[in-house]
Amino acid sequence: MISQNWTLPGDALSKILLVEDDVTFAPDLIKWLVHEGHVVDHVVTGTEALEWLSTYTYDCVILDLNLPDTDGIAICRLYRHSGGSAPLLFLTGQNQSELKEIGLDSGADDYMVKPPDLRELSARVRALLRRAGGTASNVLRVGQLVLLPASRKVTRKGKEIELTALEYSVLEFFVRNKGIVFSPEELLDRVWHSDSSSSPHTVRVCITRLRGKVFDEESECSIKTIYGAGYIFE
């Protein structure tokens, strides 16, 4: 089957790789995660999972235990052995205590049995992201700039700023990663869809528009260009 990328127009709290071969269960789970604001890449085999994990950067991995070509424990071990550090949650129909122990000892951070309570799943994903330094706050403030992730609204000096979904996602990413330089290619990997045809030029255009809408000479912060390296939020 062909791997897929899913998102709502509102774009991303985080980028999740879902490895799930149950074609009757996966669509409902994807729909829920997208509704929660996440970008979801979906693959159905272990081979695809390892390929996408080695190619793209994810904030969280949701992994089935039983896959057509291998088992999730082997995928988890290979991912951790290669240095993969994203939080990983096993989602499986098997509830044996021994399997839970093996799964967690293989490098997983959490384990849930299918079918999960979707609200509990969301809470566990949020907890994993918080532990990894991900989406922890309901309000992001930098001086007079305020971001409300739940509604994807931005205000400065109390005045709301109209942004596109992508512009908001880029701004939130920078605010959550203050002081870190990101190249255009890294921004494409972290914020844009994995199978997007966008280019570094797309990134430059988006950041130029953001600067014009959000910042001015009086701003306490801005997205600055580090020539030859990329962009930084200071």
Image (cartoon, helix red, strand yellow):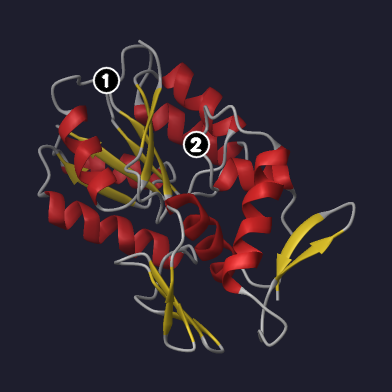
Residue 77 appears left or right of 66? right
The type of residue carrying mark 2 is His
Rendering coords of residue 71 (x, y %) = 35, 23
- Residue at horizontal 46 percent and vertical 19 percent from the top: 48
Residue at the disc numbered 2: 193
Residue 119 appears left or right of 56? left
Residue 22 appears left or right of 196? left
- Residue at horizontal 63 percent and vertical 75 percent from the top: 215
User: Whole-Å distance between the Cαs marked 2 and 1?
Assistant: 21 Å
- Residue at horizontal 60 percent and vertical 64 percent from the top: 174
User: In the image, is residue 79 above or below residue 173?
Assistant: above
Locate the N terminus by quadrant.
Answer: top left
Residue 197 appears left or right of 14? right
Identify the image quadrant of residue 27: top left
The answer to whether the residues at label 2 and label 1 have Cβ atoms under 8 Å apart is no
Locate the C terminus by quadrant.
Answer: bottom right
User: In the image, is residue 63 above or below residue 108?
Assistant: above
Q: Secondary structure at mark 1?
A: loop
User: In the image, is residue 177 above or below residue 24?
Assistant: below
Identify the image quadrant of residue 138: bottom left
Circle number at residue 21? 1
In-front residue for pair 43/36? 36
In-front residue for pair 34/23? 34
Q: Secondary structure at mark 2?
A: loop
In-front residue for pair 220/110? 220
Rendering coords of residue 133 (x, y %) = 49, 67
The type of residue carrying mark 1 is Asp
Instruction: Sort mark 2 into few (<14), some (14-19) or many (20+) by Cα contacts within 10 Å.
Output: many
Rendering coords of residue 110 (x, y %) = 30, 51
Q: Mark 1 or mark 2, which is nearer the start of the sequence? A: 1
User: In the image, is residue 206 above or below residue 61?
Assistant: below
